[in-house]
Image: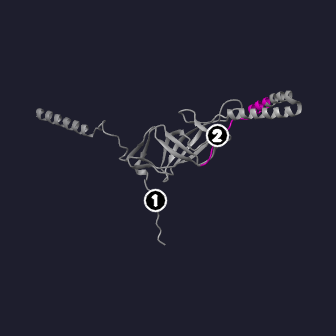
Amino acid sequence: MKIRVAWMCVLLSAGIAAAQSSLAPDPSAPAVESGKPMLTIPVGTQIPLTLKQAISTKTAKDGDPVYAETAFPFVIDERVVIPAGTYIQGKIERVQRGGHVKGRAEVLIHFTSMIYPNGYTLMLGGSVENTPGAEKTSMKDSEGTIRQDSDAGKKAQTAAGTATTGAVIGAVTNGLKGAGIGAGIGGAAGVAVGMLSRGADIRLEPGTSIEMEIQREVTVDASRISSRREVIVRND
């Protein structure tokens, strides 16, 4: 009797162990989020955008919102992952006006969310990679800071022009000696004007083309996006 009971205990323990083994998840199996088909936008992906509002370093403040939209569909494995017209929202992280003597205007923009036409919203980390639609600007660093091109040559031209005007006026009134004095006075005035005036501001107009670079991987639920535009047919 004791032997029979012992064998039954052994068989029962073996059955429980086998059941636990079959129910344990396989750590090597790929992760699936509730059976949803997921797509991944990798780090470094560049997406063309169109700016929806004007941005100027003359009036912008840190924390101001930025609105843009995708200018062209983004495709992975023949599947549209980001359709054209998807809204991209961000904010101004830092803004600086051009200095009187040195320092150029700068603005740093980060993109924070992506809103699909059907309302599906994803958080993202994006920065400005390039501004092909903005004149007289360049990228300062890998963080995405947009910087106004230097206008030192313009200030020098202003000073030279003022000096020339002073020389002409001095020559007319006091001859050659007056020309030298006038040139000196005019040059000094030109330098003063240059010191009093600020450097040029950055201004990005609505419709400006900019390129966003994805800074961290974005996972997209494929069932929440559509690769086609819905067409409504009315029979009158």
Q: Amino acid at mark 2?
A: Ile
**Alpha carbons under labels 2 and 1: distance apart:** 39 Å
Residue 91 appears left or right of 19: right
Residue occupying the far right of the picture: 173
Residue 157 appears left or right of 46: right
What segment carries the magenta color?
187-206
* Of pointers 2 and 1, the one earlier in the residue sequence: 2
Which quadrant holds residue 219? top left
Q: Amino acid at mark 1?
A: Glu
Residue 97 appears left or right of 185: left
Task: Say few, some or many: other residues with alpha carbon within 10 Å of mark 1 (under 14 / 14 to 19 / 20 or more).
Answer: few
Where does the image place residue 54, in percent across and percent down from the top left?
A: 63, 46
Q: Quadrant of the N terminus?
A: top left
Q: Nearer the viewer, residue 114 or 11?
A: 114
Indicate whether residue 36 is drawn in magenta. no
Where does the image place residue 170, in percent across and percent down from the top left?
A: 85, 32
Q: Which label is found at residue 152?
A: none
User: Circle 1 is placed at which residue position?
Assistant: 230
Indicate whether residue 198 is drawn in magenta. yes
Q: Nearer the viewer, residue 143 or 5?
A: 143
Q: Which label is found at residue 202?
A: 2
Residue drawn at x 87%, y 30% is: 175
Which quadrant holds residue 189? top right
Residue 46 appears left or right of 29: right
Residue drawn at x 68%, y 29% is: 102
Residue occupying the far bottom of the picture: 236
Dot 2: what SS? Answer: loop
Dot 1: what SS? Answer: loop
